[in-house]
Amino acid sequence: MTGRRLFENPWWIVVGSTLALVVGNGPVSLFSFGVFLKPVSSEFGWDRGTMTGAHGLATLFSAICVPIVGIMIDRWGIKRVMLPIVALYGLSIAALSLTTASAVVFMTLYAVTGIAGAGQGPLPYVKSISAWFDERRGLALGIAMAGIGIGVMIVPQIVRFMIQEYGWRTAYVGLGGLMFLVAFPSLVLFVREPEEGFARRRHRLSQAADVVLPGLSVREVLTGSRFWVLALSVLCVSTVVNGTAVHIVPLLTDRGLSLAVATSMLGAFGLGTLAGRLLSGYLVDRFFAPYIAAIFFLLGCVGIGLIISGAGGLAPLCGIIFLGLAAGTEVDMMGFLTSRYFGLRRFGELYGYIFAIFAVGAGLGPYVLGICFDRFHSYNYALFGYVGLLVLASALMVILGPYVFPVEKTEAAVGTASAATKPVT
């Protein structure tokens, strides 16, 4: 009985979410892409615009599908939707090993990974954690999203090793296998919604009182200005941090660093992301979250400045870490601010729309840098523009205004009568 109670503790959901996100679509599809970029393009003679175009197509399809996944999760629950999605995503990543010399085939296979991977990102895990945690929601989300930072440190290194030892085709197969080794069992064992862990007691409570999650309707949210302010800020930050991160490895190898050193630098980005998620998650439970986000986004400007400078020594490493701190804030803030401004009633769908916009930026950012390099043989022109986008994102955060659903209001609206089903505070 004691073991069962320990396993039912909501912090186990955070543990499971962290593990699953180590091999989420960010570390696997986005941050590992730069390690594949030169080996694949060299074998087939493709330029970087073509390669990043394939990645952009994948994120476009992912952006289209993420809101659909959110609606499905709202309707049928997390596990019923996510288990087949994780399996399909693993198979689609492994299928990239079948790439031929046709760029069309490569783009098509990548588009399939975008469709299949639309759910293997923060959305289901943020929804589960937000349903369980209220006062400590920021910390819980920060710990869970730290899995992405851990994945950025680990997964590209695994990819580099497999490419050097066995070739890039085998590396894609190995990446697909990680879904079944890590994400699938984490979902099965740990991740759940409140109704899944305490179904019978929850059913009795729902008969005794009409328990309705607080939140705005989708129509109310989409016709208001606050959603679009948040969405534009998310688009700017995603374009910058994801675009730059994808090109870190080729950018550094262009400067004469070895693949091993450049990939280790990408690991520093993961370290910054990990620190950013934990630190911002801790701070947003104590201070106004948009102000915290604005500060972290401006740190990304410093990071890009150090990268553009071309300085040696620790400058590029520090720049990459600062950029990682900014990246470590954006996904956490999307979930946290969605819950505080729009509530939990239609959280899956609304977060899906926000994450779709995030995915558009994640595809647009690398593509713009790839085109810039092909045309000017330098990333700097686009990177200067990216500094301006981060400044705009910070300004948009500042004008969001007070929370609509602060801790006190959320607790009063939920008002459950059982400690077992009450969100952790």
Image (cartoon, rainbow, N blue to C red):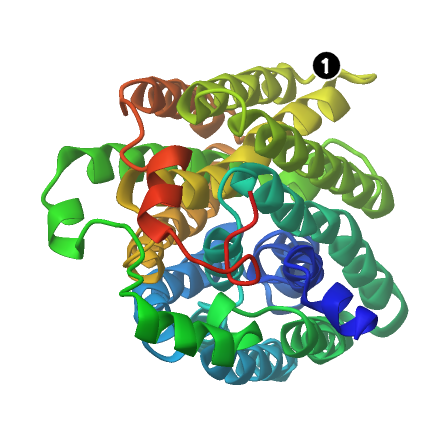
Q: Which residue ends up furthest to the right in the rendered image? A: 165
Q: Residue at x 52, y 85 (%)?
A: 84
- Quadrant location of the N terminus in the rendered image: bottom right
Q: Position of residue 405 (x, y in %)?
A: 31, 37
Q: Position of residue 273 (x, y in %)?
A: 65, 37
> Foreground: 195 or 13?
195
Asked which quadrant contains residue 218, the reply is bottom left
- Quadrant location of the C terminus in the rendered image: top right
> Foreground: 301 or 9?
9
Q: Is residue 16 above or below residue 112?
A: above
Q: Position of residue 275 (x, y in %)?
A: 70, 32
Residue that numbered label 1 is attached to: 311
Asked which quadrant contains residue 15, the reply is bottom right
Q: Residue at x 38, y 38 (%)?
A: 337
Q: Tell whether 412 sits left or right of 300.
A: left
Q: Residues within 10 Å of mark 1 (few under 14, many from 20)?
A: few
Q: Is residue 408 above or below residue 63?
A: above
Q: Is residue 368 visible?
A: no
Q: How many marks?
A: 1
> Foreground: 209 or 74?
209
Type of amino acid under label 1: Ala
> Foreground: 18 or 136?
136
Q: Position of residue 240 (x, y in %)?
A: 46, 34
